[in-house]
Image (tube, rainbow, N blue to C red):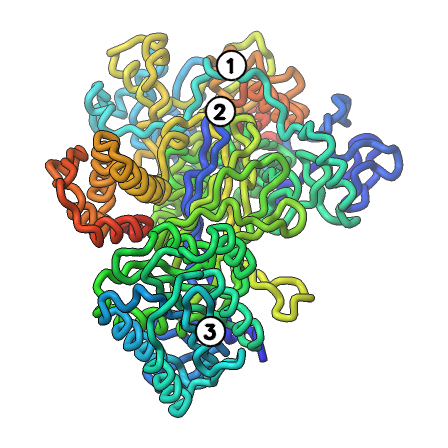
Amino acid sequence: MANFSKSNVPQFSVEVYQNEFLPEGGREVNAIVTVTSTGGGTTGGIPLAGSTPSPAYGPGQGPDAAVVLMVDCSGSMDYPPTKMRNARDATAAAIDALREGTRFAVVAGTHVAKDVYPGNGRLAVADQQTRAQAKDALRKLSAGGGTAIGTWLRLADRLLGAAEVDIRHGILLTDGRNEHEAPEDLRAALDSCAGRFTCDARGVGTDWEVKEVTGIAAALLGTADIVADPAGLAADFTRMMENAMGKEVADVALRLWTPVGVEIRFVKQVAPTVADLTGRRTEAGPRAGDYPTGSWGDESRDYHVCVLVPEAGIGQEMLAARVSLILPDPSGAGAPQTLSQGLVRAVWTDDMVASTSINPQVAHYTGQAELAQVIQQGLDARKSGDFDGATAKLGRAVQLASASGNQDTAKLLSKVVDVVDAATGTVRLKAKVAEADEMTLETRSTKTVRVKK
Amino acid sequence: MSQSHQQPALSKCPGCEEPPVAGDLFCGACGYDLSAVPARPDDRPTMAITVPPAAPAAETVRWPIAEETDSSDVPAPVVRPADVPGTDSGGRPLTGPDTPDAESGRGAASPSGPVRTGGPDSAAARVRHDDRADPGGAEASGDFALAAPDPRAPEHAAALAAAPAPGAKVCVACRSGRVDADGYCENCGHAQPRERDHMEQELDAVAAVSDRGLRHHRNEDSFAVSSTALPDGSPAVVAIVCDGVSSASRPDEASAAAASAANEALLESLPRGAHPQQAMHEAIVAASEAVNALAQEPAGAREHDAHRHQNAPACTLVGAIMAGGLLIVGWVGDSRVYWVPEDRTQPTARLTEDDSWAAQMVAAGLMNEAEAYADERAHAITGWLGADAYELEPHTAAFKPDRPGLVVVCTDGLWNYAESAEEMAAAVPADAQRQPLHAARALVGHALDGGGHDNVTVALLPFAVRPQGAGSACDTV
């Protein structure tokens, strides 16, 4: 049963970075909200062995969790045949990383979804025996059929929904486009699953659609990535599972309270990746709204909140927004628990030095968000044959990545463009770009680095 | 020392003097709107005492002769404030109009070294710019209403439906939201007035008022007033006024620490029998140490001031002591003391000399006063209390007024709107001698009417003269 006694919930802290000073007539207030959760029974990056000490749950224990592994078994998985073999091995590795007692199931996905282990719409409880049985079942998997990811997700939702656990998580692997259902069907499936479980999505090879996979991860608050070489799958799956096992608390929402007359421009997650949450608000009482953040382990994320406040005279001060982390009552009936909160303020001043300075955190993440956007625009322009536009956008991306110290993205960019001068953003498009490099850049374009402190 | 800054609106109804029930919006007896800023009726009962009754027919206090003062004149030289500036505690003369009487002070000053010559370069190198608004920009905004009610009526109606619980504090801006634990309105988000936004204190022979002004979001000024007794039982009255340097971090804490440290130092040393001029010097040093100590405190958890952390907390200080017929002033920075005689036909005077760029320019003879004050660097201060102060040079001066008058101790938030001594005298109400608190409020009002660009703080000490003559009983005014 769910047990949310306080000691099991990690400690959340909220820090607000902003320049609260506005000039006369100024209305836009920007703030970076850093949310850090610590002290839960998480691994802190240490691989989960059976005996990992865990402050909240004792050795080898954690919150009740259920995981469904969705493996693409469409016909294309046999070309080359190593893909299917690697997918089987990766899933087996993920099963090995399951914590003792975790509920789990394996779904084989084609144009229909089938729960190949344990079957009959149930979840198995991870132990020595069930792990071995599951791996046996994996060996029987064979490729053949189409791809309809929406059906996989709906089955996963049914399986996970039946379990009384705190953390519900899915891991989805695909190698091709979602060809055997309409995009609206996938959209509808994602809408019905959103908020019910979280899901990491991986594309293997280079025949899948980046926007489909990133869309699934964004809707279900998980991560998206490319595994261009199937041989890398096992390591990636193990990492994903360890990450899932590290989650302590699910369904945390970022609650934004704003006073009368304040407009919300946007709410974005900006670290570790850029994800716009503005449209995902659900109203929560007068002048307050909740933005989903999914499950949390030992981790830290940054959010960029931008609001427009009503004008006020010099010398006035107001609260522009109150940002809090909310945990819904497990029974669904009681009042939600506020984990931590921070204040975003607005102070009007005629001190030009104060009102014109930009908070370094805000500047940094504004740049990171622009970086993700120009990469996307540059790659789209390149695909549509607008090489001048692509050069301009990707040049700007190189400049931003270099200035902000985003080494990983800079490295990915350098596989798509020849960098002439990073400081000015002068680049030439490469004549030949490996498809995997382009897809990797697109998939990982939203990854950000944190501000150097 | 009691620092209870009474909020007159809360202690009793301004309309009928009935004590209101906490949380009431209107007076239960007469219906007066208690949340409105109370306009004190002008015909308040006259203050009974301007000058405390003198000590019984004992000897007047004989000060140990301050070494800085001219030794030919015992006990202390009679100096007409209108004519003669005093000396600072280093024995150096204050720059000011040359008068024959100043000669003696000059002579005594020479050993201590020349007056600091603030050449343009040296001044520029060691100045701090107080956070000053350009008074010219004020007109653009016109007068703005403090916390004007939000005109969005429908939202208000909605908020009123969720009416604040009885007894809860209601927002002063929209009048419909409750005030949350952080001091902001739960409806419109406006910050609620803080205790320091407006402070008043009145003792028998001193009154002080401090106000946030209209353009600053917090009050970075501070004051302390107190009265004590000398060893012979005669009264001593102290007023300290400090102005936090806005370009430094935590200026509000600096000014509060300095004012209270200086005041406490004087309350300790005066009853001990220390010479008041020496006591003032030591009080400024004590205040400086208190401000320096703030710089060592961890500045963590103050994201509020994040972009200003590079500056140690700093403030100016000006103080006045009335004791034994003497008026002692002491200062660092550009806060000032003015002398306004009760008989307005007599000359008025400024008793302090700013540690400011403009004052240095004038003192060095490089500019005339009009040119210097027209320069944008005019108000950059060259002396302050704070860990990053180059060298602490407390100035003190002793005066022996020969006629009754008013001592005006104020920050630049006031004197910006009454710079010359004549303008200051014109701004002081005629009955200030008898109603110092009322007059202090009127002076703050003068600054707010002028634009209120800075925090405004003023302390008024009505000075009464006792006829000189050893052993004679002192009469009252």
Residue at the spot x=54%, y=76% of the render? A165
Q: Position of residue B183 (x, y in %)?
A: 60, 46
Left or right: A287 with respect to B106? right
In the rendered image, the residue lying farthest to the right is B29
Which amino acid type is marked by label 1? Ala
* Disc number for residue B140: 1
Q: Is residue A108 above or below residue B38?
A: below
The residue beneath circle 2 is A24
Q: Position of residue B86 (x, y in %)?
A: 38, 23
Q: Secondary structure at mark 1?
A: helix
Q: Quadrant of residue B468?
A: top right
Q: Kindly tell me whether residue B36 is visible in this rendering.
A: yes
> Observer-nearest residue: B62 or B33?
B33
Badge 1: residue crowd in 10 Å (few <14, some 14–19, many ≥20): few
Label 2, label 1: how far apart the Cα atoms are: 10 Å
Report in which chain the residue with disc 2 lies.
Answer: A
Report in which chain the residue with disc 3 lies.
Answer: A
Q: Secondary structure at mark 3?
A: strand
Q: Position of residue A244 (x, y in %)?
A: 40, 71
Residue at the spot x=25%, y=65% of the render? A79
Q: Give yes or no for contact between labels 2 and 1 (Cβ–Cβ under 8 Å).
A: yes
Q: Give yes or no for contact between labels 1 and 3 (Cβ–Cβ under 8 Å).
A: no
Q: Secondary structure at mark 2?
A: loop
Label 3, label 2: how far apart the Cα atoms are: 62 Å
* Disc number for residue A408: none
Label 1, label 3: how far apart the Cα atoms are: 72 Å
